[in-house]
Image (cartoon, rainbow, N blue to C red):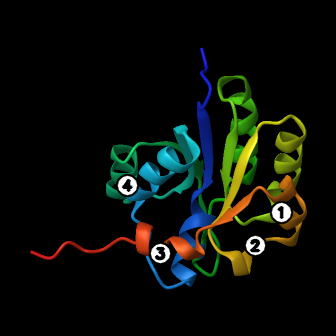
């Protein structure tokens, strides 16, 4: 039975990671998971990611930080670029889980999620869109969600991964 404040996050892993890296820093995923809990009352955080053999340490660390991983098979293009588009899986999973959360937090800057954001907003099921990078925030998302957008640009001091010194 869901309780008030049982919000779920649906995270576009590639969009989050690439956007943060383009801003010149690395995300501390453990701190980010705590931030989602404290700021948005996120009980479950689904992290959508392309599966690449050999990345088991990454997957294990994300799970240990409290994320529920949803994998997408990946393909390697002729020029060596690995692609694992998770958009459809994120939308589908958001709708599968729909009865189990009070509100959703969508973590992405991708305009492909505008229809999902509009739908959730219309049903009063959208908590926030958390965009990793304000400069790369889709115009389609900007028009969706009726001002329910937050940006990670200013969170570097709070969420940046800092290597532990021996």
Q: CA distance from mark 2 to mark 3?
A: 17 Å
Q: Secondary structure at mark 1?
A: helix
Q: CA distance from mark 1 to mark 2?
A: 7 Å
Residue that mark 1 sits on: 141
Measuring from the top left, give residue 66's x and y in whole percent: 40, 43
Residue that mark 4 sits on: 30
Which numbered disc, 3 or 1, marks the residue that appears first in the sequence? Answer: 1
Q: CA distance from mark 3 to mark 1?
A: 22 Å
Name the residue rendered at 45%, 80% in the picture.
Answer: 25
Q: Is residue 135 left or right of residue 33?
A: right
Measuring from the top left, give residue 118's x and y in whole percent: 88, 48
Q: Secondary structure at mark 3?
A: helix
Between residue 49 and residue 63, name the one nearer to us: 63
Q: CA distance from mark 4 to mark 1?
A: 27 Å
Which numbered disc, 2 or 3, marks the residue that appears first in the sequence? Answer: 2
Q: CA distance from mark 2 to mark 4?
A: 24 Å
Residue that mark 3 sits on: 156
């Amino acid at each position: 039975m869901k309780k008030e404040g049982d919000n779920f996050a649906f995270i576009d892993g590639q969009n989050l990671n690439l956007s943060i890296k383009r801003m010149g820093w690395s995300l501390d995923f453990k701190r980010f998971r705590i931030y989602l809990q404290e700021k948005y009352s996120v009980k479950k955080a689904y992290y959508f990611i392309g599966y690449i053999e050999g990345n088991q340490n990454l997957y294990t660390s994300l799970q240990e930080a409290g994320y529920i991983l949803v994998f997408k098979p990946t393909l390697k293009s002729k020029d060596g670029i690995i692609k694992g588009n998770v958009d459809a899986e994120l939308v589908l999973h958001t709708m599968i889980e729909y009865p189990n959360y009070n509100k959703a937090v969508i973590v992405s800057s991708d305009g492909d999620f505008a229809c999902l954001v509009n739908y959730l907003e219309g049903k009063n099921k959208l908590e926030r869109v958390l965009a990793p990078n304000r400069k790369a925030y889709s115009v389609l998302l900007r028009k969706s969600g009726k001002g329910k957008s937050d940006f990670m640009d200013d969170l570097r001091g709070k969420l940046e991964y800092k290597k532990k010194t021996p």
